[in-house]
């Protein structure tokens, strides 16, 4: 007998369920989670390097996602915070079960804020919920003005955009005003910060907002 | 790039569901894939051809409905496609717009056979039924 079965389900329903379980677990632990997305090299690790030492009111931990290397984790090891590296062995994104496994190797008992650096890629990670409470997309001015329009899923699923490498603005044709306008057109309530991890410009404002967010969201 | 993980996730869901219904062979799968979902139909097909080998889904027809991106103006209700130059409403210029289509990654339905049982019972070989799942 031949049958048609109507499913009507999200392809990633299993990941979504796992992510919800994670979110519940994080909530129970009193931890806020930030998932950081960007194209390769936009500055995710640099943002962590610039942000974490400035945190005064909250204690941070990091899960580093990378396709193959542990370099990003090595860059952060001097911070003396709980830090776990996930190597995805080729996969272009993290998923909720990878985060679940990483948690087994971490002591989060004295942590308020967990950063997850996703694999450098603006397409695939957008579809995978990691149980985070906040999604941040980093866009560097070296990448060009058209990124939000080209990768709407990454921007639409994020609540914060960090426009990084503003020290390079004089050397690029990046149209900051236009990008900010486009991002707001996509998502009127998007938070945007312009920063330079090189010069430190704008970092204080972002850190201040982040600490406030962690405390408010408790 | 992540099409293989999408296909694997899709196959897990369907194979589990099929098993619970005693369906032994999957003959057709219907997916809905949005223009902005980040998944490409061509890559999905290639991934499916590889991942389905040796499973009850091998050889199944993969039907992909591509859903174009669609915006709706929250001010005047106009429905339009996003343009390269931005997402403002072409009728009233408002920037208060909502993406109401284009992010889909959905399994619509699948067709299957419970092989041995069906052949024994019905002289025609096939009958078709429809089942809903909540
Ligand atoms: N000029 C300038 N360079 C920066 C800035 N932020 C980061 N960089 C440089 O950009 C390069 C990439 O930065 P990373 O922080 O490694 O970027 P990433 O997003 O973590 O990269 P992947 O993890 O490989 O995807 C490094 O050489 C950084 O030094 C900035 O504000 N200005
Ligand atoms: Mg990095
Ligand atoms: Zn309008």
Image (tube, rainbow, N blue to C red):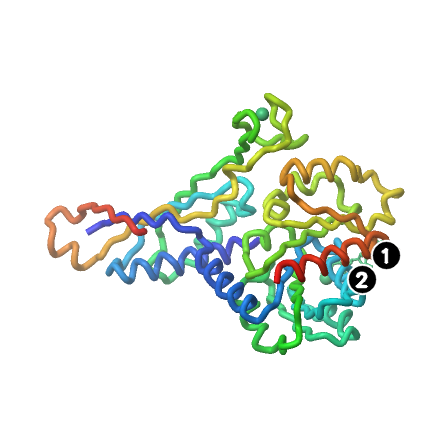
Dot 2 beta carbon under 8 Å from ligand 1: yes
Would you place residue B92 above or below residue B25 in this image?
above
Dot 1 beta carbon under 8 Å from ligand 1: no
Q: Which mark is on residue B17?
A: none
SS assignment at label 1: loop
Displayed quadrant of residue A203: bottom right
Displayed quadrant of residue A44: bottom right
Mark found first going from the N terminus, 2 or 1: 2
- Image coordinates of residue A136 in percent, x first then y, are 67, 53
- Image coordinates of residue B104 in percent, x first then y, are 48, 44
| Residue B36 visible in this rendered orientation of the protein | yes
Q: Are the residues under badges 2 and 1 in a single subunit?
A: yes
Residue highlighted by disc 1: A200
Camera-side residue of A112 and A144: A112
- Image coordinates of residue A172 in percent, x first then y, are 84, 42
Residue highlighted by disc 2: A50
Residue at 18%, 59% in the rendered image: B116
**In this picture, residue A139 sits left or right of residue A201:** left
SS assignment at label 2: helix
Rounded to the nearest angstrom, the CA distance separating label 2 from label 1 is 7 Å
């Amino acid at each position: 007998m031949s049958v048609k079965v109507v499913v009507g389900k999200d392809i990633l329903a299993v990941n979504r369920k796992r992510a919800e379980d994670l979110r519940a677990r994080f909530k129970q632990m009193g931890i806020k989670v930030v998932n950081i997305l960007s194209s390769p090299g936009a500055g995710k690790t640099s943002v962590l390097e610039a942000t974490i030492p400035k945190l005064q009111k909250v204690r941070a931990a990091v899960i580093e996602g990378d396709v193959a290397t542990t370099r990003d984790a090595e860059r952060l090891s001097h911070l003396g915070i709980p830090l776990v590296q996930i190597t995805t062995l080729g996969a272009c994104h993290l998923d909720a079960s990878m985060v679940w496994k990483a948690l087994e190797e971490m002591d989060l008992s004295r942590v308020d804020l967990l950063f997850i650096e996703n694999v450098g890629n603006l397409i695939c990670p957008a579809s995978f919920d990691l149980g985070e409470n906040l999604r941040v997309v980093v866009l560097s001015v070296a990448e060009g003005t058209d990124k939000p329009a080209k990768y709407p899923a990454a921007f639409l699923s994020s609540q914060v955009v960090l426009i990084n490498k503003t020290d390079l603005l004089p050397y690029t044709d990046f149209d900051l005003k236009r990008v900010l306008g486009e991002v707001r057109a996509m998502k009127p309530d998007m938070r945007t910060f312009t920063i330079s991890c090189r010069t430190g410009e704008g970092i204080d404002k972002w850190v201040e907002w982040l600490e406030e967010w962690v405390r408010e969201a408790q | 790039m992540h099409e293989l993980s999408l296909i694997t996730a899709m196959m897990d869901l369907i194979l589990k569901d099929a098993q619970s219904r005693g369906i032994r062979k999957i003959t057709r799968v219907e997916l809905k894939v949005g223009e902005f979902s980040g998944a490409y139909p061509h890559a999905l097909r290639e991934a499916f051809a590889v991942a389905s080998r040796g499973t009850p889904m091998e050889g199944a027809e993969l039907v992909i409905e591509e859903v174009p991106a669609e915006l709706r103006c929250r001010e005047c209700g106009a429905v339009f496609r996003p343009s390269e130059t931005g997402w403002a409403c072409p009728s009233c210029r408002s920037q208060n717009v909502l993406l109401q289509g284009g992010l889909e990654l959905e399994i619509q339905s699948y067709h299957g056979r419970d092989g041995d049982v069906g052949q024994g019972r019905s002289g025609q070989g096939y009958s078709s039924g429809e089942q809903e799942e909540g």
